[in-house]
Image (cartoon, grey):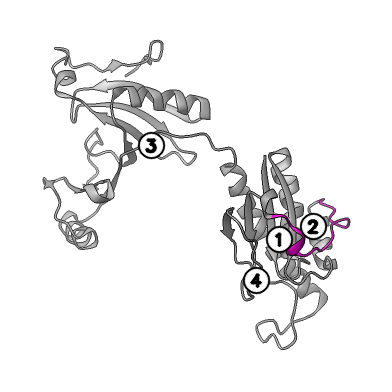
Amino acid sequence: MSRILFLCVANSARSQMAEGLARQLLGNRADVMSAGSMPTQVNPHAITAMAELGIDIRQQQSKSVDTIDPATIDMVVTLCAEEVCPVLPGKVKRLHWPITDPAPRAGDSDFPDKSAEAIQARFRTARDHIKARLEVLRELLDLPEGPQAWEFHSSVRVADLPASVRFYAWLLNSWPKEWTHRYAIFIRPDLHLNFVLVVSDGKTLHQDTLYHLGIGVADRCSVVDAYHRAVSFGAHIEKPPRTTWKGTPLHELWLKDPDGTLIEIYARLTDTEFAEKPADELPVFLVPGTKPEVT
């Protein structure tokens, strides 16, 4: 279980809302608390904003960061924007989420309307921004280890290949390794980058022109290991691990991300593996029982 501390100056609004939201969103995956460098009391507008989501923070109290033992904390999240954030010493994971203080201050020209309705609207905005960040954090906690990648690959489709080649050659400070009338391939070993520009000409996509992202791994065993990790993680398997010979010979696994983008996890064949190419050049599936009906 992660032990998370939310910090702001007064520990009255942002960090208090973060504590209440995290307690609901993270459940038993985290032990959460909040504190401040100049603690006051929980702001009534924060209580109201949280009550609108069915979260009761009336029992929460403002407290000083000096009362927190750094040895009991795994992660510190600071929420100050304009102010100097409190500091918790020690070796902990640190995140900074700059959220504008929703509470009005004297002489604040950026907040001329200090009516109760306007103040409450600011608290809702701060609450919702914190909630959205916490929803991302929730997905990162207890994240299992992924494939050990040594290269990142991406293919993007472009309308004007020469113009795009010029732009990306400038951006990457490198000529493409090779190019044809339909694509150009940039290789940057120092960035572990394999980047392909593909002409968006309406022709049928195939293994050399497919828009996708990918990561290169060490060998065939690593592709199979990535498959088992993906199954355990709950990733969508688009195509199970296989060795393909047409186009660029690869050991490959195809996943699909939550938005439908294809992800290829691949390893290049050794000379010995390439020599095993079957006469029909049909894919060879690497995990028993995973061959789909249509390949």
Asked if marks 2 and 1 touch (Cβ < 8 Å), the reply is yes
Tell me the residue at 63%/74% (across/down): 84
Residue that lies at the very extreme toward the right in this rendered image = 59
Q: Nearer the viewer, mark 3 or mark 1?
A: 1
In the depicted structure, whether residue 41 falls above or below residue 253: below
Q: CA distance from mark 2 to mark 1?
A: 8 Å
Label 4 Cα neighbours within 10 Å, binned few <14 / some 14-19 / many ≥20? some
- Mark sitting on residue 262: 3
Residue 94 on image: x %, y %: 57, 56
In the foreground, 106 or 8: 8
Label 3 Cα neighbours within 10 Å, binned few <14 / some 14-19 / many ≥20? some
Q: CA distance from mark 4 to mark 3?
A: 37 Å
According to the picture, the residue beneath numbered tag 1 turns out to be: 127
Q: CA distance from mark 4 to mark 1?
A: 11 Å
Q: Secondary structure at mark 4?
A: loop
Which circle's residue, 4 or 2, is located before the other in the chain? 2
Look at the image and tell me in which quarter the C terminus lies: top left
- Mark sitting on residue 50: 2
Whether residue 197 can be seen here = no
Label 2 Cα neighbours within 10 Å, binned few <14 / some 14-19 / many ≥20? many
Q: Amino acid at mark 1?
A: Arg
Q: Secondary structure at mark 3?
A: strand
Magenta stretch contains residue 60: yes
Residue 198 on image: x %, y %: 22, 46
- Which region is colored magenta? 54-69
According to the picture, the residue beneath numbered tag 4 turns out to be: 100
Label 1 Cα neighbours within 10 Å, binned few <14 / some 14-19 / many ≥20? many
Which circle's residue, 4 or 1, is located before the other in the chain? 4
Whether residue 127 can be seen here = yes
Q: Secondary structure at mark 1?
A: helix
Q: Quadrant of residue 218?
A: top left
